[in-house]
Amino acid sequence: MRNLAIAIDGPSGVGKSTVAKLTAKLLGITYIDTGAMYRAVAFYNINNPGIGLEESLQKINIDLKIITGEQRVFLNGEDISEKIRTQEVSDYTSRVVAGNEAARQKLVEMQQQMAKEKPVVMDGRDIGSKVLPWAPVKIYLDAKPEVRAKRRASEMEAKGEPSDFEQILQEIRERDERDKTRSVSPLVQTEDAIYINTGALTPMEVTEKIVEISEAAKCIIS
């Protein structure tokens, strides 16, 4: 019998990570931040420019640990949880790492092994299509680019960071295009994924929908 696995996909800024964390907490299962794993690879390569991406994969050890109730990302023993949340890392991840076949193969293997060991919630762009195609629960979150840009601007302002709505909107549209058209594991909504538009919903409202779907799936697979 397979463990419960919840695959949450969708474009940038749609609320995947927030909802995935809440879902994991309410169901008492493990949240796997796959995006952070790709960001960790990007962070290493940005800070080690003399090493090629594929070569760097042999020098990278990524570990996700729960510390005081929060998931932290460790790269070769160093906690880089905050360092990977910069715009530079985000752009590099999208432009260079996400479409690299060797990087995806290594990280997908790690993610699949995690799902074999325990029930998980994973979010990303190819979880339902490539990482966990067998997952009994597949969710596709979406919202208009303008809604996502407004959310991102609000988050930056809350942190005291300068924000430019038009620039953020343009970056989101460009990233959507890259994610959907890349040759390796593009962002897609699988036929068996349940579509949820998060534009007019709070994170908890989205989470409650996913938990309801997941509870029904647990009864089927148990």
Image: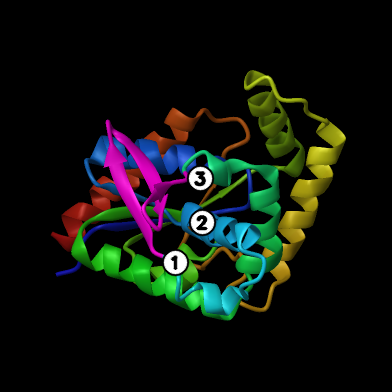
Residue 108 percent coordinates (x, y): 42, 71
**The magenta stretch spans which residues?**
61-80
Determine whether 131 is above or below 145 in the image.
Answer: below
> In the image, what residue occupies the spot 34% across and 51% down?
64
Residue 81 painted magenta? no
- Badge 2 crowding class, 10 Å Cα cut-off, few under 14, some 14 to 19, many 20 or more, is many
| Nearest to viewer (mark 1 / mark 2) | 1
Quick one: which residue is furthest to the front in this view? 50
Q: Quadrant of residue 79?
A: top left
Residue 92 percent coordinates (x, y): 68, 58
Q: Amino acid at mark 2?
A: Ala
**Gap between marks 3 and 2 measured at Cα:** 18 Å
Q: Amino acid at mark 1?
A: Ile
Q: Amino acid at mark 3?
A: Lys
**Gap between marks 1 and 2 measured at Cα:** 9 Å
Circle number at residue 40: 2
**Gap between marks 1 and 3 measured at Cα:** 25 Å
> In the image, what residue occupies the spot 36% across and 53% down?
77
Q: Quadrant of residue 146?
A: top right
Determine whether 28 is above or below 77 in the image.
Answer: above
Residue 75 painted magenta? yes
Q: Which residue is mark 1?
A: 60
Res 161 seen here: yes
Q: Earlier in the sequence, mark 1 or mark 3?
A: 3
Residue 179 percent coordinates (x, y): 67, 63
Q: Secondary structure at mark 3?
A: helix
In which quadrant will I find the C terminus? Answer: bottom left
